Image (cartoon, grey):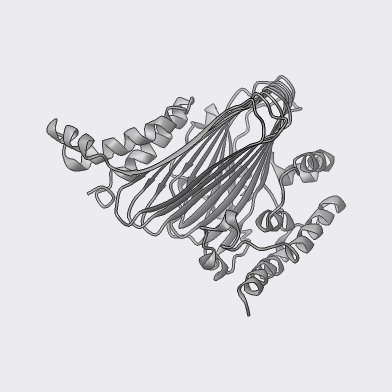
Amino acid sequence: MNTQLQQRQWFNNIVAQNIANMHEDNPPWLSKACEGAINAISTMTLPDRRQETWRYSDLGRLYKQDYYYQASAASNIEDSAIAQWVYAKNESHRLVFANGRFVPGMSTRHALAENIKIGSLRELISSEPELVAHWLEQTSWQAPDVFSELNLALIDDGLFILVPANVVLDKPVEVVYQNSSSEQNTLAQPHSLVVLEPGAQATVIERFSGADSSHYFFNGVTKVSLGAHAGLQHYRLQHESRNAHHLSRVALRQDTASEYSGINIATGGAWSRTDIDTRFDGQHARCELDGLYTVGEQQYTDFHLDVRHSLPNCSSRENFKGIVYGKGRAVFDGRILVEKDAQKTDAQLSNKNLLLTQHAEVDTKPQLEIHADDVKCSHGTTVGKLDPGQLFYLRSRGINEHEARKMICLGFAEQVLSHVDDEQVQGFVHEQIAAIFGRQDILP
């Protein structure tokens, strides 16, 4: 059996093994969408390393394992499973998903106006199916791939946020996707929608975590739709089991003069990949994407950005940094497309990487494709080692070598962390990064 047939069989097995665990009470329109996704899986081109967007990605370990929905996990999760919260319970709207399924008992939603929706996609499918159908259709602009079709084929639950026009959400929304496995490898596939109508403002923190030794495949989709003059602060913090495979897609659509600020932190997982697809549907919109990834022994982390400027007077800035140690491997593939009519575009792309060991590896490919003639665009990348001059300076001030290396790493990361406007999020991430580089086995 050739590789493509083996891979297609893997997808078919995942569907066949899990379809019985799906909800039987799906409305007809959702059942039809699931059937369409199942049919699409059987005909779509599957990812392999001959495709440019999957050139550096080795999915061999993923395809060697089967994964299953585990409905019982939601009832077994305890608060202690989540090591730390960004916000105290009374300071945020808190939502917890265990293996992709909502856990009401661990979630706290404070008093909300009736037309504000914060909660579970499954809840809304049951209580307001027309609302979900509308927004699932409205957020279907991203070109499908076989993994997003797998997510839709077995759609079960996920985050749903709808902030009405001109409403400023009173508290941030902290969402934790907690993953674990027991006798079988777990499949978690949340399908999440974040919708801000014109003039609405919100802060959303998505956290992806898992028990240390758990084997699971997280295959998540988050769709973000911003109306005219809406604004979203969106933090995505991924720190998962060293046995986990993590694949997530962010599909972002921005209307006139909307503002999106996304901070992406990736520190965990055996294999993780994040795809961010940005589309401008109105002029004078602004998108800022920042990212920081730390990649260690036997880890693989991958970021793919696709920012498309098709209208005039929009701006985007992408700034990603990576620190790679041990035998870790990182990939950054960032693309900015400026189409012919996108005059007055301002687009900047930067990727910088720090390698701490001789076996660490990074593949970086920033791309700038410009078809307009009145633009201000730039892109660049660097890959380097710790600066001996900086080390010497710190050592000459009486700082031991381990602490000096740690200080340089934290200083390198600070350019990304400084863009975190929320003090509690910044403190949470800074503590996490400091703990990683405080370990003697990483920085001798």
Query: Going 43% across and 60% down the picture, which residue do you hit?
Result: 213
Whether residue 10 is situated above or below residue 209 in the rendered picture: below
Mark count: 0
Q: Residue at x 54, y 71 (%)?
A: 64
Q: Residue furthest bottom?
A: 1
Image-quadrant location for residue 436: top left
Residue 382 % position (x, y): 40, 41
In the rendering, at what x and y percent does residue 408 appear?
A: 28, 36
Which residue reaches farthest right? 28
Considering depth in this image, is 159 or 420 the residue closer to the camera?
420
Camera sees residue 352? no
Name the residue: 48% across, 25% down.
421
Q: Classify residue 20 as left or right of residue 299.
A: right
Rendered location of residue 16, percent (x, y): 71, 69
Residue 70 in sight from this viewpoint: yes
Quarter that holds the N terminus: bottom right
Q: Is residue 423 above or below residue 15?
A: above
Compared to 367, does 215 lie above or below? below
The residue nearer to you, when weighing 347 against 132, is 347
Q: Residue at x 81, y 58 (%)?
A: 36
